[in-house]
Amino acid sequence: MHTAERGLFDLMRGRPLFVTARGRSESGGILAAAVEGLQTSTIEELRRLGDGRLRLALTESRAQSMGLRAPSRGSGNGSPGPSDLYGQGNHPVSLDLPDDVDASEILRLSTSAEKYRSPSVTLRGATGPETAALALARVGRLLPAVVCAEVGADRGAALSDALDSGEVLRLTTGDVEALSAGPGLDVHRVTEATVPLEEAENARVVLFREAGGLFEHVAILIGEPESWTDPVPARLHSACLTGDLFGSLKCDCGEQLRGSLRVFAARGGGVLLYLAQEGRGIGLGNKLRAYGLQEDGLDTIDADCTLGFGADERTYEVAVQMLKDLGIRKIQLLTNNPEKVRALKKGGIDVVEREPLHGTLNRHNLPYVRAKVSRAGHWLEEMLSGKVP
């Protein structure tokens, strides 16, 4: 797993990786680099160290948004690797890139809502190494798109020298699978401190860190735990920088955050889990890209899928582990999201009662709230029935 962790770091820095199939570290594979932050120099390096031809590995939903028909299952080269990147039928695909393609064009191909207009395109199922590179980008919440160059078993001296010197990291699909299967499933308590809040002076903040060290989550404890009611009032709140900190009118996140803290204070206590799952788990950069697509008329879910993500990338294993660490097994959950209720119950948390938590409807967040109701089944019909100022 340590090799894959360094590979993730290199991918996020824009450096290419050499990925081979499991158990075939000395054979051929691919050179891969993230589309996010892609530089001309990186493209040149991929061509120089690889076979000279470039491919773009994407998720199936991204290919569909480009107007490309995904190939039938098993149409890759049979290399081992995860076949379903997001657990929602989002199978990776790979397409050939023109010889004269540049970094800006590759980024446009990976993010634009426009259809792909190439007169001919070779689209196939992604190989195991291509899928592994995409999975690594997913762990880092990068744009789910990687540029790849094939490398044969008789790789050239330049690549061999780069591998031997450590300039290019070698890893296998097995390394990536071990990492991508693990994040979020194991967290540990790091530290805690009393932090008086505007909505609740008697507050304590507990910091949790995932085992991989990439993401940190916070539990905000309101009141004295020994005086909490049974069940404990609780909320799972996914981080939203734009709404929570800057008061964005495109969502109701900030209002829900502060409103839940006020509820806890009024009831003598409760716990808010602040989860590092910006943009429903796609990261801040991709969330802002999705905002740009929404300006062109897409709803929040279609915008995410256009970028290659599923409708909601969040999981709640971390929340389950945090609650258990805090000794909380029975809760009154403040939420409008049925998936949170299901996930907590599945994890062994007794959700005794579900209570709605509404923000204020406005002309900017109306499409967002409508999509949550019609596309994700959130319990927000009452909020939608109100008048828009």
Image (cartoon, rainbow, N blue to C red):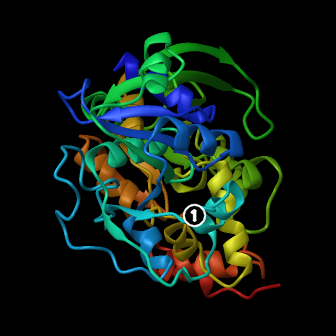
Tell me if residue 69 comes above or below residue 145 in the rendering.
Answer: below
Label 1, on which residue? Answer: 110
Q: Residue at x 50, y 50 (%)?
A: 146
The relative height of residue 381 versus residue 334 in the rendered view (above or below) is: below
Q: Is residue 273 visible?
A: no
Residue 164: x %, y % from top left = 43, 12
* Residue 200 at least partly seen: yes
Q: Amino acid at mark 1?
A: Ser
Q: Is 178 rendered above or below residue 349?
A: above
Q: Nearer the viewer, residue 206 or 48?
A: 48
Q: Quadrant of residue 139?
A: top left
Which quadrant of the figure has residue 21?
Answer: top left
Give residue 145's position: percent from left, percent from top.
Answer: 50, 54
| Foreground pick, 41 / 196 | 41
Pinpoint residue 180: horizontal percent, then vertical percent.
35, 36
* Residue that appears at 36% across and 34% down: 19
Disc 1 crowd rating (10 Å Cα; few below 14, some 14-19, many 20+) is many
Instruction: Please tell me which residue is depicted at 50% across the width and 20% down the height of the picture.
Output: 162
